[in-house]
Amino acid sequence: MKTNLLILAVYLVCQFGGAAAPLTESTFTEVINDVSTLTPDGSATPSKMSVLLKAPDRVRTGSQSRAELMAADKTITRVGANTVFSFADQGRTLNLEKGNLLFHSPKGLGGGTIRSGGAAAAVLGTTLIVSSTIDDGFKVILLEGEGSVTLANGQSAVLHAGQMVYVLPGGTRFSPILDINLAKLVSGSLLINGFSHELSSLPFIFRAIHDQTAQLTSGSLTDTGRPADAYLFPPVPGNGLDAQEHGTYQVAIPAPITPSQIESLYGSGQANSGSPTPGSSGGSGLVPISNYQPGSNQPP
């Protein structure tokens, strides 16, 4: 299994040929409740259906609010509640200042790069959710397809549908990959179900759910019933890892983390570099769960 997570880009793998057209603007296709467009001078106007959003203007959503935008190449951006994002004025980059968004770029029609804090995710031909964290990290949840994520320092891994991973605060390393219950996530996510029309990639997401459900039924996967965030210790607000898109569940116990992998996550020289120590406020806070037994109330 390969995952490539980039501090400067997370590349989601697909078959794609040719250069992608710039993604600097999209049209509002749905606006729900409190959605505003912010101009560089700080003025705000209510966002409206069929209006074009162009860089460098930003979108801001309030509580219980969301929006959908579509580019000319059918790339879809869905924005969750309490979110601020914008398109860059060149290339195919979305800047996620806070909150959550769903990004879908149809296979063969071009991808994009999502930046949040000090990290960025370049996506190509698949569907994912990105949630910012309070210390300039983010988590990526892959809903369908396959994706690679690569850090600027060369560390890499591959995400499959129903998996999530964090770019940790500081953006120089990432968490172990966590398997989630995709059916539970999809059923509870307003980024998928909170709009008047169906997401174009929903059939592919349903196929991924079907495949995972078959694994759960056969016993090759076991749902622990605990949120995946619970395995990032300490699982409390303030450590920079408790992202806002909730409803994710741990499904399968990942392989044990080797000492060399732990070293690559934490690094013996971090204390001298000013990075927080594992488990501290703002730190990595990861615990391997290879010894976790279903029904246990605590991670090991």
Image (spheres, rainbow, N blue to C red):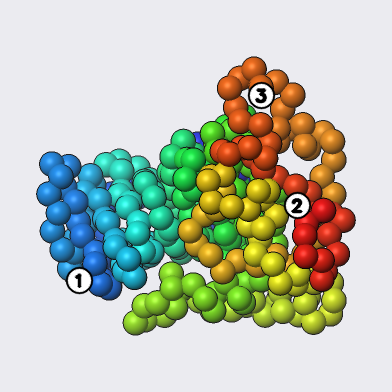
Q: Is residue 6 above or below residue 233?
A: above
Q: Is residue 15 above or below residue 214?
A: above
Residue depicted at x 15% and y 45%: 42
Q: Nearer the viewer, mark 3 or mark 1?
A: 3
Whichever of callouts 2 and 3 sits on the residue coming sooner in the sequence is: 2
Evaluate whether residue 83 shows in this view. yes
Find disc 3 in the rendering and name its residue: 270
Query: Label 1 near label 2: C-beta < 8 Å?
Result: no
Q: Nearer the viewer, mark 2 or mark 1?
A: 1
Instruction: Point out residue 73 in the picture as x, y percentages from the top left corner.
Output: 34, 61
Which secondary structure, mark 3? helix
Instruction: Point out residue 195 in the picture as x, y percentages from the top left corner.
Output: 36, 78
Which secondary structure, mark 2? loop
Residue depicted at x 35% and y 56%: 83
Whichever of callouts 2 and 1 sits on the residue coming sooner in the sequence is: 2
The quarter holding residue 175 reads top right
Q: Nearer the viewer, mark 2 or mark 3?
A: 3
What type is the residue that disc 3 sits on?
A: Gln
Find disc 1 in the rendering and name its residue: 49
What type is the residue that disc 2 sits on?
A: Met
The quarter holding residue 159 reads bottom right
Instruction: Point out residue 91 in the picture as x, y percentages from the top left corner.
Output: 35, 42
Which secondary structure, mark 1? loop
Query: Label 3 near label 2: C-beta < 8 Å?
Result: no
Asked if residue 145 lies left or right of residue 92, the reply is: right
State how many labels appear: 3
For marks 2 and 3, give the CA distance: 28 Å
